[in-house]
Image (cartoon, helix red, strand yellow):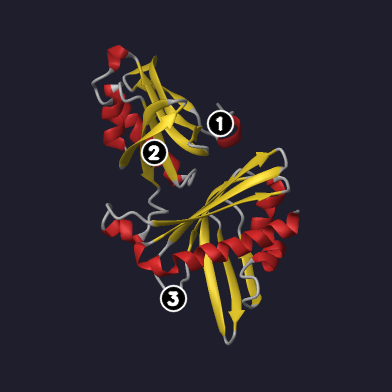
Amino acid sequence: MEPCYERYGVGLWALELRDQPGRLIGDCGLTYQDVEGSRELELGWHLLESERGHGYATEAAHACLTYAFERSLAPMVCSIVDPANGASRAVAGKVHAACREFIKGERAMLLYCTPSPARQLPARSAMSTITPLQVQVTRHIRSSPEAVFDAGVDPASIAQWFGPGLGEMVRIDVDARVGGRFVFTQRRGNEDVEHAGEYLVFDRPHRLAFTWTLPKYSPDVAHVGIEIRPSDTGCDLRLTHELAPNWADHAERTREGWSMMIDRIAALVE
């Protein structure tokens, strides 16, 4: 388990009853866990058997989930539950929005997930059963995770990798922190095209997540997540761009665009 208290200000917190302060009945909180090769923020809880069935775990889990999203700690919070643990399944079902099976350590487990309200696409808010399209790009880059991460948020580097060959960069504003916003404006012919967003996760050098919009052309909000994992010869980058289903015709163009930009980043840091 990562040193979450020191690094992120979160972890497992003690649970006490309001009318019995100092009497520990369990714990509940947030830690980073490995889920299918990705670092995800997990909401977990443990309760004394004698205190189960009163709604304490559900109340605490809801409070921790709210805390995580109010502070933009992650674009999604999950809970990993053993299918045989009926009590935890009941709590997770009340707290989370979705559930699926996955394999962890050669065991079938349940993964309950809730996306942050800040990253939900408009299509989801209209109909929660609609799944966004995912465009993924992966690259091995022969440089350190730190160098790759920094190139992604440094204005001087952005000027070199964003929209290669499409026009002059006329504005690059970056507030590089969770909750900070960015604006990239590129002059394409006689038109200034603006891409803007907000950083949802800023975990250097492991993970970056942000919203992605074209305010002049659409109210839709997409989500982009970048994971960078060290390797013996540099690092492996995986970018996932989620967009609303009505943008399906642009999926391949989106993939090609990010592929070119990641190639540019690689050329800058290798």
Q: Residue furthest top?
A: 50
For the residue marked with disc 2, what is the amino acid?
Leu
Which residue carries the number 2 mark?
A: 65
For label 1, the crowd category at 10 Å Cα-Cα, with few meaning under 14, some 14 to 19 and many 20 or more, is some
Left or right, 161 with respect to 76, comes to right
Residue depicted at 56% across the width and 66% down the height:
257
Q: Residue furthest bottom?
A: 190
Judged from the image, the secondary structure of the residue bearing numbered disc 1 is helix
Q: Which of marks 3 and 2 is nearer the N terminus?
A: 2
Judged from the image, the secondary structure of the residue bearing numbered disc 2 is helix
Measuring from the top left, give residue 40's x and y in whole percent: 48, 38
Residue depicted at 26% across the width and 56% down the height:
127
Judged from the image, the secondary structure of the residue bearing numbered disc 3 is loop
For label 3, the crowd category at 10 Å Cα-Cα, with few meaning under 14, some 14 to 19 and many 20 or more, is few
Left or right, 270 with respect to 10, comes to right
In the picture, the quarter occupied by the N terminus is top right
Which residue carries the number 1 mark?
A: 4
Q: How many marks?
A: 3
Q: How far apart are marks 1 and 3 (CA)?
A: 40 Å
Which residue carries the number 3 mark?
A: 217
Residue 176: image tag: none
Q: Distance between the residues labelled 3 and 2?
A: 33 Å
Q: Earlier in the sequence, mark 1 or mark 2?
A: 1
* Location of residue 192 (image quadrant): bottom right
Residue depicted at 42% across the width and 40% down the height:
77
For label 2, the crowd category at 10 Å Cα-Cα, with few meaning under 14, some 14 to 19 and many 20 or more, is many
Residue depicted at 48% across the width and 47% down the height:
72
For the residue marked with disc 1, what is the amino acid?
Cys
- Looking at this view, is 258 or 72 the one in front? 258
